[in-house]
């Protein structure tokens, strides 16, 4: 947040309770040295806070975002005199957290920087179930964005909750649209229109090399969702070669072709500036359209205030109007270790970050989407500047019935890597979409079988 919510490979599932215990012993020595380093930088509570139950949380943000989260922690501590949450920030490497859990000395709460690690933790029974948060007089599922609960649910139980989420919209450069004769007030509505616009907006020099890319290459997982595809069926069985997934890869293949081929796209993209800053390719006119997240309006206001741009829902297939407002919702889930020293107090903090006050104040600071529905219409978040009005688009998109989260699986990190590899094979012309996804299906079925065998040891 802004995070690379869908990238990276996760720890693979495997090893039941016996293997889990063996890994604890093997990693214990390494962990003590690690914890000594990590905890040495943790702020200590004032003497007047002695007697309060200390709850340790590991978070991943740095810089201004870390300070924003610390303010939230401070708000909780100021209003909960019995509990003192101590925040250890900057833990962006989930392996540190996993090692701590493996060794039996975990933090009470922690954020997962790579959500694909959730599946292995669930399969190894390392997380506290959160079902007790819901019921009469407690939280209600209807309060939440459905995708916010979906991202933490496995085998009928809830294992994590986000503290804000993110989703995707279409950004377009109005001036670039005018230059090629496109209506600057009408972005592409369908994925077919998006292909046509991307081709027209791609500008080439006298040598034929790209000077402006019509559309920055999008996340292939998102395109799968837009085509109504899926990664697993209702029983959790992989469905890599689902016909809708194949259609998504065909569309992606056609996109690259219309942009000029992957060699030209890669050559041009290699010169892109830093993603967060004034040299962002969309801010300086190197890309005319992109599919990106809710933090972009804030970045535009800060780094490119003169940019004339628009924000619209991500297009859908022309033949599937029922897929309007489809989206892939992600974020950094907040989990409680099953071996937490203070699970009751950890649950108290987790419950507090789901309150409207905590959601609104953090969303205002982080420019991410509240996962509580009652906050989505907050005038504080959505009214005033152009940035807030553009940001408000994402709050509506995240609440769409067609918004969904990636499934939880012990092999999801491996699976997503293989789907990305398949994309690369397809756009480089080494495999057809059908062959590439059939290969992924065989690999992930074998990997899931190994993970299930390990869990049964």
Image (tube, rainbow, N blue to C red):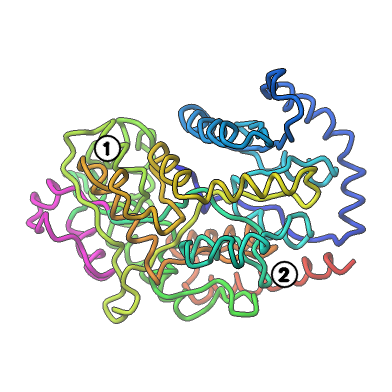
Q: Quadrant of the C terminus?
A: bottom right
Horizontally, is 341 left or right of 296 in the view?
right
Viewer-closest of 250 and 114:
114
Callout 2: 10 Å neighbours few (<14), some, many (20+)?
many
Q: Position of residue 418 (x, y in %)?
A: 59, 62
Residue at 14% over, 48% down: 176
Badge 1, how many Cα within 10 Å: few under 14, some, many 20+? many
Residue at label 2?
Answer: 448
For this orientation, the residue located farthest to the top is: 47
Q: Is residue 81 visible?
A: yes
In the rendered structure, the answer to whether residue 413 lies left or right of residue 255 reads right
Which residue does the image show at 86% across and 62% down from the upper left?
16
Nearer to me, 279 or 149: 149
Residue drawn at (27%, 37%) of the image: 300
Residue of label 1? 300
Going from N to C along the chain, the mark reached first, 1 or 2, is 1
- Residue at 83%, 66% in the rendered image: 455
C-alpha gap between disc 1 and disc 2: 43 Å
Query: Where are the magenta residues, as a range?
Result: 171-200
């Amino acid at each position: 947040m802004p995070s690379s919510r869908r990238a990276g490979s996760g720890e693979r599932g495997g090893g039941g309770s016996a293997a889990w215990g063996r890994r604890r012993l093997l990693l214990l020595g390494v962990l003590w040295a690690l914890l000594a380093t990590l905890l040495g930088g943790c702020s200590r509570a004032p003497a007047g806070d002695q007697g309060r139950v200390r709850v340790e949380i590991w978070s991943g943000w740095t810089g201004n975002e870390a300070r924003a989260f610390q303010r939230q922690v401070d708000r909780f501590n100021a209003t909960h005199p019995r509990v003192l949450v101590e925040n250890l920030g900057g833990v962006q490497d989930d392996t540190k957290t996993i090692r701590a859990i493996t060794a039996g000395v975990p933090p009470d709460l922690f954020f997962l920087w790579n959500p694909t690690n959730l599946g292995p933790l669930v399969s190894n029974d390392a997380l506290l179930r959160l079902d007790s948060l819901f019921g009469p007089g407690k939280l209600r599922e209807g309060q939440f964005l459905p995708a916010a609960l979906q991202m933490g649910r496995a085998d009928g139980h809830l294992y994590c909750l986000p503290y804000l989420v993110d989703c995707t919209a279409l950004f377009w450069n109005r001036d670039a649209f005018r230059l090629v004769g496109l209506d600057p007030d009408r972005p592409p509505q369908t994925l077919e229109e998006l292909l046509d616009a991307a081709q027209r907006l791609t500008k080439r020099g006298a040598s034929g090399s790209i000077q402006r890319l019509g559309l920055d290459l999008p996340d292939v997982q998102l395109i799968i969702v837009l085509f109504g595809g899926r990664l697993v069926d209702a029983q959790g069985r992989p469905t890599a070669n689902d016909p809708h997934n194949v259609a998504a890869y065909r569309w992606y293949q056609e996109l690259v072709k219309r942009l000029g081929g992957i060699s030209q796209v890669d050559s041009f993209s290699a010169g892109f500036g830093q993603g967060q800053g004034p040299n962002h390719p969309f801010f300086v006119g190197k890309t005319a359209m992109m599919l990106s997240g809710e933090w972009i309006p804030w970045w535009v206001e800060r780094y490119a205030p003169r940019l004339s741009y628009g924000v619209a829902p991500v297009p859908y297939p022309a033949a599937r109007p029922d897929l309007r407002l489809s989206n892939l919702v992600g974020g950094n889930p907040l989990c409680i270790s099953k071996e937490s020293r203070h699970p009751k107090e950890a649950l108290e903090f987790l419950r507090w970050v789901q309150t409207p006050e905590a959601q609104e104040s953090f969303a205002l600071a982080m420019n991410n989407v509240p996962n509580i529905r009652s906050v989505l219409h907050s005038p504080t978040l959505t009214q005033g500047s152009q940035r807030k009005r553009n940001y408000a688009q994402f709050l509506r998109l995240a609440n769409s019935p067609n918004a969904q989260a990636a499934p939880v699986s012990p092999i999801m990190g491996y699976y997503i890597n293989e789907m990305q590899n398949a994309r690369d094979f397809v756009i480089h012309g080494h495999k057809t979409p059908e062959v590439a996804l059939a290969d992924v299906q065989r690999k992930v079925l074998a990997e899931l079988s190994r993970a299930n065998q390990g869990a049964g040891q």
